Amino acid sequence: MSIITNINKVFDHRIRLGIMSILMVNEYADFNMLKELLGATDGNLASHTKALEKAEYVVVEKQFIGRKPNTRYATTKLGRAEFKKHIEALEKLINK
Amino acid sequence: MGFTLIYFISNLTKIYVGYFKIFYLLCISKYFYMESKDYLKDISEIKDLMNKSSRFISLSGLSGVLAGVYALIGAAIAYWLVDNSGREYLILDGLVFKLVLLDLFLIALFSAVTGVILTTRKAKKHNAKIWDTTSKRLVINFLIPLVVGGLYILIILNQQKYGQTGALMLLFYGLALVNASKYSIGDIRYLGFIQIILGLICACYPGYGFWLWVLGFGVMHIIYGIWMYFKYDVE
């Protein structure tokens, strides 16, 4: 078995790792919260959330707060499991 | 003759395979060395983001110290009021009782205002937002046990049962701290436990209620505030 078996390509980017970390400890996070915490631009963040959404690791909820549209994200069961596997693999790599 | 040739060739391939192995290992180790450095950074960033996004950590230790000082001053005023009233015990409808309630209210108000001011200052220093998801969550979860406790105390005071007031204040405040610790610096959980234990002792010995209150709200706040100040605020 290779050492990098559980390293997940989908998470192999700083921003995506950041999005998942925030969503692991929060029930949900909206777009602006992610933007502020990660210091990413709108377009950049949107493309990374889209990638995670496509892999079905996060779900997107669009709603209106008053008149403002609000997009918020939450992890799926699959996303949480995959993220945990990924982190464990990272730790193993570091401890080698 | 043929045998030696085969032997020679097999030896040669062994040597080459050996070289390839070393070359391969060199490549891999270099790759992993560089990668693992990045992964280490990733892990620390993950931890940082998890903390920053779920906990409000700009609480000021100094505000704890000042809250303790206010409590001690307030307690001294209450002691003086009761001592000068000519009676040993409080009478529920009397003027002295109303003054003590006002005294308590002022302690809470001053502590809250000081806490907000000092915490805002600290948050500004760290370029953190003062009113975001994390601080809202902290305030709400802190206030749930506290408001319930406050209302309960008012209700039983109205029913003339005032023997347990000190104990109830300590208990509900302790529960509020334990509840809030999930959304802020984890250390305040232990201050919560201390208040709860003091509250339970206070419930057993209502006669010492005043002194246990002073110990919990005054002395413990000061000790804890100083400790937190040196742990988190001094750089």
Image (cartoon, grey):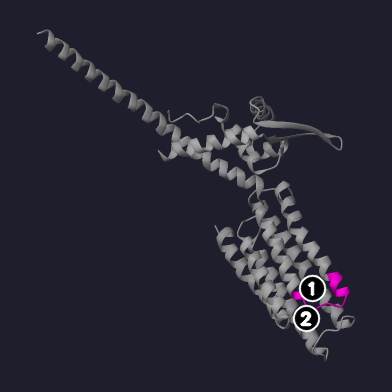
Indicate the chain on which mark 1 is placed: B
CB-based contact (under 8 Å), mark 1 and mark 2: yes
Instruction: Name the amino acid, label 2.
Output: Ala
Q: Is residue B221 visible?
A: no
Measured as percent of width and height from the top left, residue B14 is found at: 23, 19
Span shown in magenta: B154-166
- State the SS at label 1: helix
Considering only order in the chain, which callout, 2 or 1, is on the residue closer to the N terminus? Answer: 2
Instruction: Name the amino acid, label 1.
Output: Leu
Measured as percent of width and height from the top left, residue A41 is found at: 67, 31
Residue for badge 1: B104
Q: Residue at the spot x=69%, y=58% of the render?
A: B179
Question: What is the crowding at mark 2: few (fewer than 14 residues within 10 Å), some, or many (at least 20)?
Answer: many
Residue for badge 2: B78
Q: Nearer the viewer, residue A47 or B148?
A: B148
Q: Residue at the spot x=34%, y=24% of the render?
A: B24
Check the picture and name the quadrant holding the N terminus of chain B: top left
Q: Residue at the spot x=69%, y=30% of the render?
A: A42
Question: In the rendered view, does B48 fall on the left or right side of B136?
Answer: left
Give the vertical position of B7 relative to B166 (above or below).
Answer: above
- Residue extending farthest bottom: B86
- Residue extending farthest right: B93
- Answer whether residue B149 is magenta in the image: no
Measured as percent of width and height from the top left, residue B112 is found at: 75, 63
Quote the CA–CA distance across marks 1 and 2. 9 Å
